[in-house]
Image (cartoon, helix red, strand yellow):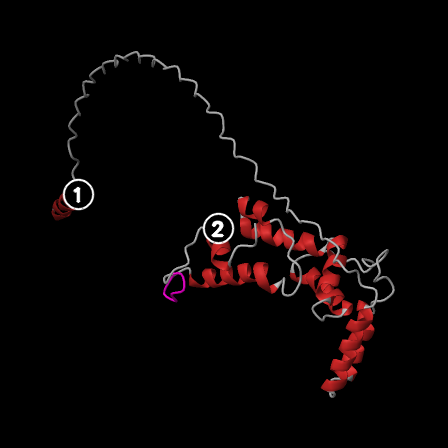
Amino acid sequence: MSAPNLKELVETQGVVIDDWFYNSNNPNYQNNLALLNRASSALYGDIGANLDVRNWDAIMASADPLTAAEVALALMYSNKQYLVANTEHVLKQGYAPEQADLTYQQMEDRVGASYDENWTEGTRFEGRIDTEDYLLTLTRLESNPAAAQAYQDAKVEAAKVDAPVVTPSAPVITPVIVSPAPVVPPVPVTPTPLTPVTPTPLTPVTPTPLTPVTPTPLTPITPMRSNLALYGFGALALLLLLRR
């Protein structure tokens, strides 16, 4: 299977690309744009003129095709056999091997590939790619576009000298997508029935009757005459006594 188009890949994410998908009033509008950019990079932006040898049958059959496409992209740019075949491929399109090597370096950050600076070992490109010098030369020739183009053409022609007639085959990259483990429902636990507790009846308490208390009668008190009265009678007696 060839690579899907952008709409097909995006719609594997449970969305439908229609007018509402692109409507700025859609509450998912920003997420939709991000999804489009992500799928576009996986299909086109991170491929460009390079070979795309991903196993699209396996990718589209996976539970998450977009993620599978991204995983396969990283695996592809990490594969030495692919790098060699792809360098031959872009060379025929007028790109210098240094340009291919620079792409492989950038893919480490862009797609999470693992760049191996020794990928040319054992190939016809071994010892013939100097990306750092290539970039410095182009920088020096920035003010002279004609000279820069002539340098570029010379690099390409020099690399074509002993190029194989048939571009070496690149491996088909199949991503290994680990499906999430199925969620095992918990074993239901049957609750142990509670044993009803019979309350112990309360023993009624008979109140002790109160013994009535007969109040003691108060003894009346005869009030005493006041001292003033006594003094008065004494004074009167004394007066009468003095008159005699």
Any magenta on residue 171? Answer: no
Amino acid of disc 2: Thr
Residue at 54% x, 49% y is 65
Where residue 190 is drawn, which disc sits there?
A: none
Q: Quadrant of residue 28?
A: bottom left
- Mark 2 Cα-neighbour bin, 10 Å: few <14, some 14–19, many ≥20: some
Judged from the image, the secondary structure of the residue bearing numbered disc 1 is: helix
The residue tagged 1 is: 234
How far, Cα to Cα, is label 1 from label 2?
136 Å
Q: Is residue 25 above or below residue 81?
A: below
Residue 205 versus residue 149: which sits nearer the camera?
Answer: 149
> Would you say the residues marked 1 and 2 are in contact, meaning their CB atoms lie under 8 Å apart?
no
Q: Position of residue 209 (x, y in %)?
A: 23, 14
Q: Residue at x 54, y 62 (%)?
A: 40
- Position in image of residue 225 (x %, y %): 16, 38
Image point (77%, 60%), residue name: 165
Residues 211 and 40: in front is 40
Q: Position of residue 25 (x, y in %)?
A: 36, 65
Q: Residue at x 17, y 30 (%)?
A: 221
Highlighted range, magenta: 21-26
Query: In the rendered view, does 7 fall on the left or right side of 93?
Result: left
To which residue does mark 2 refer? 12
Kind of residue sitting beneath label 1: Gly
Foreground: disc 1 or disc 2: 2
